[in-house]
Amino acid sequence: MDIYIHGYLICLLLFLFRSETACHPLGKRRCEMQAFRIWDVNQKIFYLRNNQLVAGYLQGPNTKLEEKIDVVPIEPHTMFLGIHGGKLCLACVKSGDEIKLKLEAVNITDLNQNREQDKRFAFIRFDNGPTTSFESAACPGWFLCTSLEADQPVGLTNMPTEALKVTKFYFQQD
Amino acid sequence: MRIVLWCAGLAASPSCVLQKFLGAMFLLSVLIMGVSTFAVQSEEHSVAAGSCRFHGRHPKTRFKVEGEPLVLTCPQVLHWESTSAHVNVTWRRNDSAVAVPGEEESRVWVRDGALWIVPASQADSGTYICTVRNASYCDKMSVELRVFEKTDASVPLIFYPQIIPLSASGLLVCPDLSEFIGNRTDVEIQWYKDSVPLDQDNQKFLNVRGTRLLVNNVSMEDAGYYTCAMTYAHKGRQYNITRNIKLRVKKRDEETIPVIISPHQTISASLGSRLTIPCKVFLGAGIHTTTLLWWTANNTFIEDAYHGGRVTEGERQAYSENNENYIEVPLIFDPVRREDLHTDFKCVVRNTMSSQTLRTTVKEAATFSWEIMLAPLSLIVLVLGGIWMHRRYKRRTGKAYGLMELKTGHPDSQSYPSKIKEIK
């Protein structure tokens, strides 16, 4: 009897407080999405300019432009990254010899880690003290970066130690 | 057409704008007359005709303080520099047809594609349009500028929020100074915390003369208002450039070792009924996002083990109780079958810190049946029925007695109240 009541109570609770389904190691199901704040160690915040993700300093009322990163974890260290409520996803795209960070209009919760073509959306996080770096799973050795200069596009670099690029971010749950 | 393009490239004086306009009109008439001939090169023509692609307003409004020098950079320029060798940048106010001059004679001028105003006044507030063009392409973007008198009321508009997590050290950055600094190495910045200047012999702050202030042993007390300032000389006058920063110190998100606190090792259930077993994980102060939680049946994922969906994983819940974080994923049987009694169910939790597995078996509960449920129910019905019958019988006999008394017509003062009671 106890189990019955417990079960029904849980069903009722689940019905009342529905959310996205849990992320699952199988990756077959829709995953839970969570917003994170991201800013580089030089305090630059992400925002969109002409559909391009850029990093810069935002003053007063401009802070509402801040783009938070929507995260769907695949593995404890691997995740899909998106913005705009998970409607635009960050991808590493190779065109010819060039490797670029691209924003693609796909729903983050529709991505599947087991699908080869979705691999470009996966990033591996590396934590070093309070900072985090993100390496593209599809483009090994390429890390998410910002320029030292403000208001420049967020991109990828294969030289994370280069002084002109910032690959260390603060990445905190919103 | 060459002349028109050349002029467009140097569209810095009013006379040139006029020439450009006339040229554009001429070109337009030529185009209308010979559309078929020019169709292939239409893009180039449209550029020459002055129809420049407008990219809209820059999302950032610039908030500046009156009396300070300011620089508006053309948002498209850096992108252009990487793709094209030579571009021409012009600026104008949207309510003026005249481009800002390239000479530093006046208070407002254009240098290296950026608009300089030294010093800014409140009247400079408005919309500025930056046009970038080369021989084959042209685009425009507008930038919003608002210049304030520095008062307590304008502080919320001009400050830059910055965040450092609680850690060994972190940086505060004096923003939007690069145009004033350029390649200069002799620039000195003065940092202030809550209007108190920071000294060089400060243990807490390092690099107090640089654009990036290093904060050592970051603590909650370091939060607050900071100001950084530098001076800029123009035409023999020194101007102050200040930036206000509001620093927030944030407690770091941390992962903790997850602990499965339920279910029990055995769960009793009746065959044929629906069953939900929640797997509840305690995370303490830890964040839940990067913690994975799932069920297995005989070491197989639930989805793979039950294609028909008789047994499923419910939705994941993340919640807090008394400031402690929990996550929960239920395993749902609809219904429980005999085979479940011999299946090895496991709840698995994993994050970067550790992983844990808890095994659960389903045990058949004492058979639940409607007969058992009906037995006490029928007993209750019987008892209630008996009481009702008894009362009904009593009421009938009472009524008969009362009538009898009335019929006999013997007034008896002593028995009167009791009669009334019985009649009732």
Image (cartoon, coloured by chain):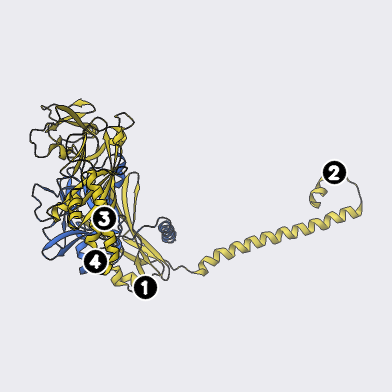
The span from disc 1 to disc 4 (Cα, nearest Å) is: 82 Å
In terms of secondary structure, where does tag 3 sit?
A: helix
> Are the residues under marks 3 and 1 on the same chain?
yes
Q: Earlier in the sequence, mark 3 or mark 2?
A: 3
Q: Amino acid at mark 2?
A: Gln
Q: Earlier in the sequence, mark 1 or mark 4?
A: 4
Camera sees residue A15 = yes
| Chain ID at mark 2 | B
Q: Nearer the viewer, residue B373 or B201?
A: B201
Using the image, tell me which numbered label, if any, was put on residue B38: 4
State the quadrant of the N terminus of chain A. Answer: bottom left
Residue B286 lies, in percent from the top left, at 26, 48
| Chain ID at mark 4 | B
Callout 1: few (<14), some (14-19), or many (20+) C-alpha neighbours within 10 Å? some
In terms of secondary structure, where does tag 2 sit?
A: loop
Residue A132 lies, in percent from the top left, at 17, 49
The span from disc 4 to disc 2 (Cα, nearest Å) is: 128 Å
Q: Do the residues bearing badges 4 and 2 touch, measured as CB atoms within 8 Å?
A: no
| Chain ID at mark 3 | B
Left or right of A78? Residue A31 is right
The span from disc 4 to disc 3 (Cα, nearest Å) is: 15 Å
Camera sees residue B346 = no
**Mark 1 lies on residue:** B338
Using the image, tell me which numbered label, if any, was put on residue B414: 2
The span from disc 3 to disc 1 (Cα, nearest Å) is: 86 Å
**Mark 3 lies on residue:** B24
Give the colour of chain A.
blue
Quarter of the image holding residue B45?
bottom left
